């Protein structure tokens, strides 16, 4: 796929970007270069290759999912200015 200068000007107009002829020509060359790179990558045969989440073999160190803190819900609500049904009440700030 390659773009013409008219395509670039149309895209710029749709994006509400004012471009001169020289800018459109430079942008056309850059976009066509990007499309060429994409076409090259799509041409690579990737059948039989498993997808990877990362370019390197990186593993997340995970700890055991266990509770380490005690439940202090009641203690925190005891010092709150306003509580109702286990929820903190705050003043209304938006009318």
Image (spheres, rainbow, N blue to C red):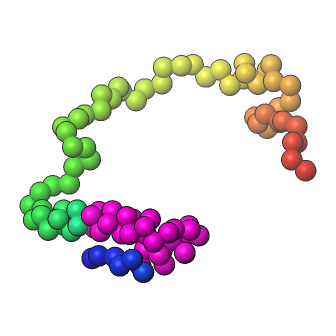
Q: Position of residue 57 (x, y in %)?
A: 18, 37
The picture quadrant where one finds residue 8 is bottom left
Majority secondary structure in the magenta region: helix
Residue 10 vertical placement versus 60 (above, below): below
Residue 31 appears in the picture as rendered: no
Residue at 40%, 29% (x, y): give it: 65
Q: Position of residue 82 (x, y in %)?
A: 86, 30
Depth check: 67 or 92 in front? 92
Depth check: 18 or 75 in front? 18
Residue 85 appears in the picture as rendered: yes
Residue at 29%, 76% (x, y): give it: 2
The picture quadrant where one finds residue 51 is bottom left
Residue 94 vertical placement versus 34 (above, below): above
Q: Position of residue 9 (x, y in %)?
A: 47, 75
Residue 77 vertical placement versus 36 (above, below): above
Q: Is residue 3 left or right of residue 37?
A: right
Q: Is residue 56 left or right of residue 32?
A: left
Please state the extent of the stretch shown in magenta in the rendering: 7-35
Q: Quadrant of the N terminus?
A: bottom left
Residue at 38%, 69% (x, y): give it: 25
Residue 15 vertical placement versus 7 (above, below): above
């Amino acid at each position: 796929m390659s773009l013409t200068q008219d395509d670039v000007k149309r895209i710029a107009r749709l994006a509400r970007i004012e471009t001169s002829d020289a800018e459109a020509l430079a942008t056309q060359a850059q976009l066509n270069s990007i499309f060429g790179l994409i076409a090259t990558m799509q041409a690579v045969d990737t059948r039989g290759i498993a997808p990877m989440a990362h370019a390197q073999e990186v593993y997340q160190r995970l700890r055991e999912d266990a509770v380490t803190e005690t439940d202090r819900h009641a203690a925190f609500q005891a010092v709150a200015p306003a509580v109702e049904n286990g929820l903190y009440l705050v003043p209304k700030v938006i009318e």
